[in-house]
C-alpha cells in the first residue's frame, strides 16, 4: 500500500506540474488582455509535432539520429510556438480584444479547430497517433522500492524553475512591470506611456512558449501525441485556471495540482476510474463556479497578474 501511495504521489506531482504550466498560459493571457484564449491548448500541442518534424529533418540531413537532435528540436519547437502565438495574436486575436467576450470565445474556438485540421492534413499521417519519446529516461533514485524517474524529476525541476523565472520577470524587470501595469488597467498604462503592442506581443510569446513546454511534457508523459490532444490539454489547463482563479498565477499552480490530484485519486480508488476521471474534474469546475466564481485564489475585483 505504501508503494502505491508513493507512486501515485509522484504521478500527482508530475501531472500537476504539467497542468499548472498549461493553466499559467491561460491566466497570463486573460490577466493582460482579458481574453479567454481557447485555442491555447491547440497552440501548445503543436510543439510535439514541430519537434518530431525538426528531429527527423535534422537526422535526415546529417544521416545520424540521436538525442542531441531531439534536444535541438525541442528548443526550436518552444521558440517556434512562441512566435506562432505572436502571429495568431496579430492576425486574429487582437481584433477581439475590445469585442464582446462571446466573439472572442467563438473566434478562439474556431482558431483551435483550424490548428487541429492543419496538423491533421499537413503532418504526414496526421490523423494517426505518433509515438513521442521520453525527454529523459532512466531512474534517478529510489524511494523505498519505488523508482523515481529522471522524467518526473525533470518535470518538477523545470516547472519550479519556469515559475520562479516568470515571477522574477513580472516583478523585477521593466517589461514585466509593464505587463503587470497593463493587466491592472490598460487605460492608465497607456497614459503612462506603456505601449500596448509590445506588452501584448511579449505576453503571447511567454504564454505560448510556456504552453509549448507543457505540450512537450504532456506528450512525453503519455508517450504519444495526436492532432486532437490540444482539445484535452486546453480543457484541463483552462479548468485548472478557472479553479485557481483566472488571472492568478498562484491560482493556476493550485488548480493544476488539484485537477491532477482528482485524476490520480479517481484512477487509483474508483472502479474503472480512468473512464470517469474527467467527470469528477468538471464536476469540481461546476462547484467552484457556483460557490466561488472568481476561483479559489481569484478576486471578485480582478487583480490579474
Image (cartoon, rainbow, N blue to C red):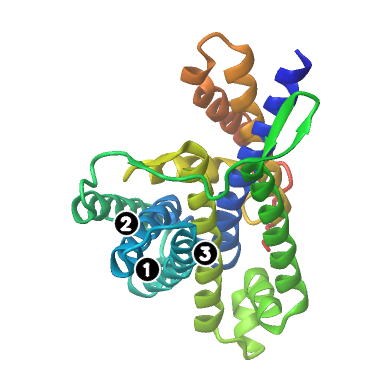
Q: Which residue is mark 1?
A: 88
Which mark, residue 111? 2
Front label number (3 vs 2): 3
Q: Earlier in the sequence, mark 3 or mark 1?
A: 1
- State the residue in front, 57 or 262: 57
> CA separation, marks 3 and 1?
13 Å
Above or below: residue 18 compared with residue 175: above
Q: Secondary structure at mark 3?
A: helix
The image quadrant that residue 61 belongs to is bottom left
Q: Earlier in the sequence, mark 3 or mark 2?
A: 2
- State the residue in front, 174 or 1: 1
Q: Earlier in the sequence, mark 1 or mark 2?
A: 1
Above or below: residue 157 compared with residue 19: below
Which mark, residue 209? 3
If the image is split into quadrants, where does the C terminus sit?
A: bottom right
Q: Secondary structure at mark 1?
A: helix
Above or below: residue 288 compared with residue 145: below
Residue appearing at x 77%, y 77% in the figure: 172
> CA separation, marks 3 and 2?
18 Å
Residue farthest along the bottom direction in this orientation = 193
Residue 252 visible? The answer is no
Location of residue 55 in the rendering, given as x and y in whole percent from the top left corner: 38, 60
Disc 2 crowd rating (10 Å Cα; few below 14, some 14-19, many 20+) is many
If the image is split into quadrants, where does the N terminus sit?
A: top right
Location of residue 103 in the rendering, given as x and y in whole percent from the top left corner: 36, 57
Instruction: Tell me if 300 is positioned left or right of 29 in this view.
Output: right
Residue 46 visible? The answer is yes
Mark 3 and 1 residues: CB-CB less than 8 Å, in contact? no
- State the residue in front, 81 or 155: 155
Residue appearing at x 39%, y 68% in the figure: 84
Amino acid at each position: 500500500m505504501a508503494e502505491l501511495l508513493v507512486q501515485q504521489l509522484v504521478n500527482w506531482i508530475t501531472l500537476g506540474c504539467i497542468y499548472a504550466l498549461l493553466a499559467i498560459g491561460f491566466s497570463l493571457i486573460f490577466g493582460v488582455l482579458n481574453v479567454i484564449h481557447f485555442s491555447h491548448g491547440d497552440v501548445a500541442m503543436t510543439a510535439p509535432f514541430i519537434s518530431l518534424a525538426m528531429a527527423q529533418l535534422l537526422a535526415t540531413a546529417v544521416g545520424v539520429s540521436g538525442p542531441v537532435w531531439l534536444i535541438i528540436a525541442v528548443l526550436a519547437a518552444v521558440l517556434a510556438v512562441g512566435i506562432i502565438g505572436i502571429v495568431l495574436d496579430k492576425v486574429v486575436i487582437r481584433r477581439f480584444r475590445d469585442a464582446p467576450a462571446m466573439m472572442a470565445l467563438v473566434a478562439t474556438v474556431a482558431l483551435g479547430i483550424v490548428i487541429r485540421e492543419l496538423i491533421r492534413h499537413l503532418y504526414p499521417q496526421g490523423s494517426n497517433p505518433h509515438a513521442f519519446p521520453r525527454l529523459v529516461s532512466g531512474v534517478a533514485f529510489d524511494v523505498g522500492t519505488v523508482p523515481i524517474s529522471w522524467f518526473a524529476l525533470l518535470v518538477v525541476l523545470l516547472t519550479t524553475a519556469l515559475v520562479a523565472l516568470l515571477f522574477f520577470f513580472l516583478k523585477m524587470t521593466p517589461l514585466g512591470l509593464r505587463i503587470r501595469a497593463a493587466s491592472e488597467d490598460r487605460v492608465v498604462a497607456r497614459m503612462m506611456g506603456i505601449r500596448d503592442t509590445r506588452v501584448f506581443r511579449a505576453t503571447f510569446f511567454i504564454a505560448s512558449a510556456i504552453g509549448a513546454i507543457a505540450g512537450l511534457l504532456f506528450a512525453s508523459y503519455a508517450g504519444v501525441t495526436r492532432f486532437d490532444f490540444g482539445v484535452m490539454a486546453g480543457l484541463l489547463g483552462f479548468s485548472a485556471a478557472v479553479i485557481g482563479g483566472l488571472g492568478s498565477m498562484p491560482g493556476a499552480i493550485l488548480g493544476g495540482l488539484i485537477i491532477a490530484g482528482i485524476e490520480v485519486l479517481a484512477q487509483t480508488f474508483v472502479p474503472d476510474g480512468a473512464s470517469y476521471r474527467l467527470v469528477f474534474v468538471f464536476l469540481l469546475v461546476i462547484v467552484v463556479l457556483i460557490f466561488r466564481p472568481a476561483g479559489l485564489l481569484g478576486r471578485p475585483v480582478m487583480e490579474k497578474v
